[in-house]
Amino acid sequence: MLVRKSLLFFFEFPNYPDTKISMKALPVNQTEQVFTRSRSLPHFFGLLRTQLLLCLLFGVALPIFLYIRGDLSFLARNPAAINSSIAAAICTMIAVVTVRKFGAFPGTIGVSYVFPSLAGAYGIAMAGILLVRAPYSGALLMLTFATSMAVRFAIGALERRREGKQYYLVPGGSIDRISRDLDAAWIMLEAPVLPSDGDVVIVADLHHDHSAEWERAFAMAALNGIGVYHYKQVWEASTGKVRIEHLSENSLGSLIPSNSYAKGKRLIDILLSLAVLPLLLPILLITALVIRFDSPGSVFFRQERIGYRARPFRVLKFRTMHSREVAKADRVDDAITKDDDARVTRPGRFLRRTRIDELPQILNILLGDMSWIGPRPEARPLSEWYEKEIPFYSYRHIVRPGITGWAQVNQGHVAGISEVHDKLRYDFYYIKNFSMWIDLVILFKTVLVVVRGFGAK
């Protein structure tokens, strides 16, 4: 029992080990076992310290050295070159770490975030330099940006792919659930014998009362760098969803997400809303005029929805449907948007596809009802219906609802009760992993969703 609890504590999230272990297929109770570390090039390029070193050396230091033609005294007497070199090094380190963090989330390919991560880091650095009016070299910053990106893309082509993992399942408990859903190669272990493959992951129901031989196998595998994970964590890492048979604590060991990040996120929501509102005013005015002249009715659509901590509020959107009277008995059905819904106006389809209809919710963000990122708020009749059908549905209100969210970028619009059940799994995954990193992943994915029109109804 102690072993299982320890493994659950240390391996709650599948951050797969950096070292590859090759082991003889010997019973774990045999005293002599052979462990050899496989130091392959893909493994070497997958290490964070390797990526930082290569990017700083070949992406920053070498280009700067060539740019100044080897004259190090040039740096000493040129403040612009010094400031630019320091900024380039810091931005490159931030981008390398960010790409690695993004790649840990399901459905993401780390190398695809190289450009946005570098662009974001360099953009913030430039804003800071201009704000304090410090001297800088634009040519040096552009050079290091290009070379750092090239080096990180090259590393991405050489580093080990995680998709090659071989999963070994330990019989017992609820392991059959993941054997049905795991979209990867897996082998069921019949006895407490450690596999001989080099790149393996052992998956078990660590809440099950395994025999002493299996517990020794878990401990031996963990001590030698082989990942031993609870089946639910592996399922979550591969699907981006959380099973909702019962409420599950997040990484802090509590049902309440990180309060410190929630406060910081609230401040960012306010500052970002105030910054973009003046820039969006022309789009908002043009959209309002188009809606006004296209069909009769109000420019805005107001609806009572359930928000943060299950408190109702009035959401504000651009109207995308024809105005109509809805009987009380039909409110649940009316709240569900169907495929090719005839109620949607001609400009409404474009507004929904581009998500422009959501922009007035900036006012809801400033009022504290919503956030830029979070589970989408549902209409009150629909939310009450879901609560009757799905256990723990109200738990999704533990964080502020958002204009975009983890479910929206992975699943799109939903209507049926089965789809809502799946959407709730995405929402719970977001709450469990509530952090700056998953919010940034959602932000980048939202851009792609808007461009492709994914999930619009």
Image (tube, rainbow, N blue to C red):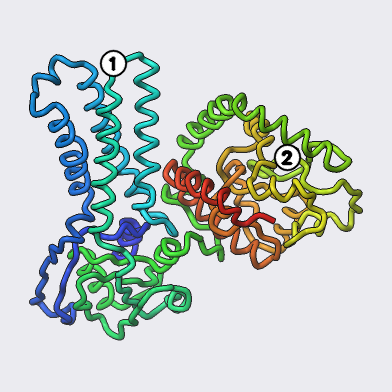
Residue 378 x/y as whole percent: 70, 50
Please identify the residue farthest to the bottom as the structure is shown: 190
Residue 259 x/y as whole percent: 49, 37
Q: Is residue 197 above or below residue 430?
A: below
Q: Residues within 10 Å of mark 2 (few under 14, many from 20)?
A: many
Q: What residue is disc 2 on?
A: 317
Q: Residues within 10 Å of mark 1 (few under 14, many from 20)?
A: some
Q: Quadrant of residue 235?
A: bottom left
Number of numbered discs on residues: 2
Query: Residue 135 — which label?
Result: 1
Q: Is residue 385 above or below residue 179?
A: above
113, 375: nearer the viewer: 113
Residue 81 x/y as whole percent: 21, 22
Q: Quadrant of the C terminus?
A: bottom right
Sequence-wise, which precedes: disc 2 or disc 1? 1
Q: Quadrant of the N terminus?
A: bottom left
Q: Residue at x 61, y 27 (%)?
A: 277
Q: Residue at x 91, y 49 (%)?
A: 325
Q: Quadrant of residue 203?
A: bottom left
Q: Nearer the viewer, mark 2 or mark 1?
A: 1
Q: Is residue 292 above or below residue 234?
A: above
Q: Secondary structure at mark 1?
A: loop
Is 390 left, or right, of 328 in this rendering? left
Tell me, yes or no, whether the two marked residues, 2 and 1, touch with CB atoms within 8 Å.
no
Query: Residues under labels 2 and 1: Cα distance?
Result: 44 Å
Residue type at mark 2: give it.
Lys
412, 431: nearer the viewer: 412
